[in-house]
Amino acid sequence: MKIEQISSVTLREKVYAQLKQKIISAEILPGEVMTLQGLADGFGVSLMPVREALRQLQSERVIVIESNKRIYVNALTAREVEEILRVRLVLETMAAKAACRLRSEDAVARTKRDLEAMEANLAHPPEYMRANSQFHFGIYGEAGSAVLLQLIDSLWARVGPYFVISSNEDQNHQAMRLHRGMWTAFAAKDAARMTVCLQGDLRRAGGIIMSLLQNPADDSAVPPSVARRTERRGGEAAARRNGTRRRHGVGSRRIASVVR
């Protein structure tokens, strides 16, 4: 009898995908410390698939694993967000323009549903940002470039938590004008209009996040772990002396045992 040994790989991929999504959705915050055992207990798996998933996320610079084995979600400085924005403008514009040319008819209906989900969740940042991600990647996926999609995904994983942290109903209302414009351009295969609306959306969101990170201690929307890690990354001596308070067992508190 032929047996295909796929279970361990499937576990690793599931842990990787779900942990990455929890980081992007800010369920686990930038600067927040995780434990290997806590994550394994939360997912209901052994240490091995969690360790492999963490290594992959480390290679993407989504998390940091220090020499003393401390594991935490990578925090960004305002300068890094600005650098990521410049790259995103190039890559996402390239993908969106190609998608306007190559998109299927089904993609228009799918992205319309994502747009409607965004509209329905303006006052609920996590759900809004989840629909926002599906909307953007629903467009980018039509570009027909797996390499381009992977590059964009890796950048979203770095900035995704900050989208949720900085999001509120008023800002989401303002962003919808640009997203409606993107969808209209996508449906009409109008690459020029898509470029204007997409780049306007990226610059708007990037500007909000950079402003938040430049003055994290003055913004009540910034969770303490983000403020502390941002200050440390920015080189402030006080933050280096005080360090970041450990928060053990993140996985066991927040992650349902869905990987069985």
Image (cartoon, grey):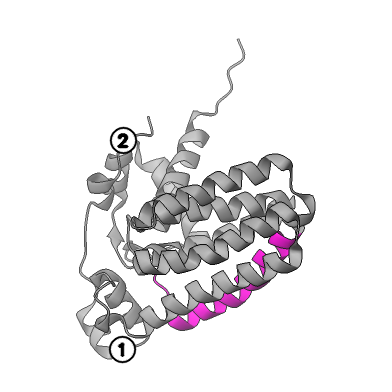
User: Which sits earlier in the primary sequence, circle 2 or circle 1?
Assistant: 1
**Which residue is painted at 47% across and 79% down in the image?**
207
**What SS does tag 1 mark?**
loop
Residue 11 x/y as whole percent? 45, 36
- The quarter in which the N terminus is drawn is top right
User: Magenta span: helix, strand or loop, mainly?
Assistant: helix
Residue 193 occupies quadrant: bottom right
**Quick check: can you spot residue 10?**
yes
Q: Is residue 87 magenta?
A: yes
**In-front residue for pair 171/61:** 171
> Which quadrant holds residue 161?
bottom left
| Marker disc for residue 236 | 1
User: Among all residues in the image, which is located at the extreme top?
Assistant: 1
The C terminus lies in which quarter of the figure? top left
Highlighted range, magenta: 74-97
At x 46% / y 53%, what residue is drawn? 118
Q: Which residue is mark 2?
A: 257
